[in-house]
Amino acid sequence: MIERRPYATLGGAHHGWLDSRHHFSFADYFDPQRLHWGQLRVWNDDTIAPHSGFPRHPHRDMEIITYVREGAITHQDTLGHQGRTEAGDVQVMSAGTGIAHSEMNQEDTVARIFQIWIMPNETGLPPAWDTRPFPRGERSGHFITLASGLGDGDALPIRAEARLVAATLEAGQSVRYPLAPGHKAYLVPARGCIEVNGVTAEAGDGLAIADESQLHVSAIQESEVVLVEVSA
């Protein structure tokens, strides 16, 4: 089963400095049919104006992944962490027992990010943060794991039975992704146009995937694909 959620049907918010689209219920947007997808709780498509961003605010007991699509984001938190994450790279914040952070676009150009929240397997753990570069050339023509709670090598660790992967595909290229039994996936093309098991998705569309053992992803145009696999 693959349900396409067109970009135009997503919830949204416009705050001047922030243009956000919500794949799931978030803040003032509520859709009882789009509360979560397994452990996946939030997938926001955010465009942040230059020299603006999210001022310091708290979280607890949530795995928060920021996938930077364009520009850069600078992170600071109450644990003393500070880092700049550039386009194509990823940061992970495990909120645990509590952490406050800011995410600012300190650049002269807009930043575009996917903000992804995954519910953890265990609550009450110490908070943590990390970032890592993943050059896009390394994911050309195949999926590479960027963050994982499933024991995937050099991926950034998360405290959930989940995995974030990404791939860049030239027009005409295809790649397969196996789904573990009982797992779901949510897939969004960051750019381009793709077909997944016969279902077409354009940039910004969401594909909610369940009861599929293998995904066959084909690029109709040059594309960048981001996928989260989660337990049901």
Image: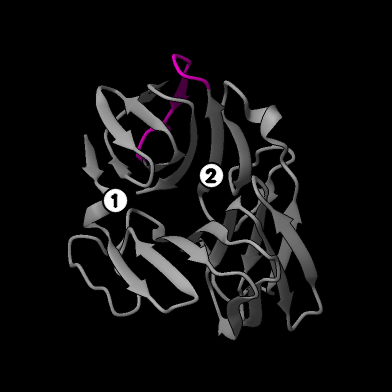
Asked which secondary structure carries label 1, the reply is helix
Q: What residue is shown at x 62% (from left), y 82% (from top)?
A: 98
Asked which secondary structure carries label 2, the reply is strand
Q: Is residue 128 above or below residue 6?
A: below
Q: Which mark is residue 155?
A: none
Nearest to the observer: residue 38 or residue 145: 145
Q: What residue is shown at x 58% (from left), y 85% (from top)?
A: 57
Q: Which mark is residue 163?
A: 2
Q: Position of residue 22 (x, y in %)?
A: 34, 63
Residue that extends furthest to the left in the rendered view of this protein: 32
* Local crowd size for mark 1, using a 10 Å CA cut-off: few (<14), some (14–19), many (≥20): some
Nearest to the observer: residue 212 or residue 12: 12
Per the rendered image, the range of residues in magenta is 170-184
For residue 83, what is the image quadrant? bottom right
* Local crowd size for mark 2, using a 10 Å CA cut-off: few (<14), some (14–19), many (≥20): many
Q: Is residue 54 above or below residue 186?
A: below
Q: Position of residue 195 (x, y in %)?
A: 32, 25
Q: What residue is shown at x 44% (from left), y 78% (from top)?
A: 16
Q: Earlier in the sequence, mark 2 or mark 1?
A: 1
Q: CA distance from mark 2 to mark 1?
A: 23 Å
Which residue is label 1 attached to? 7
Q: Is residue 47 above or below residue 213?
A: below
Q: Position of residue 160 (x, y in %)?
A: 53, 55
Q: What residue is shown at x 47% (from left), y 72% (from top)?
A: 18
Q: In the rendered view, does 225 fall on the left or right side of 32?
A: right
Say which amino acid is labelled 2.
Answer: Arg
179 magenta-colored? yes
125 magenta-colored? no
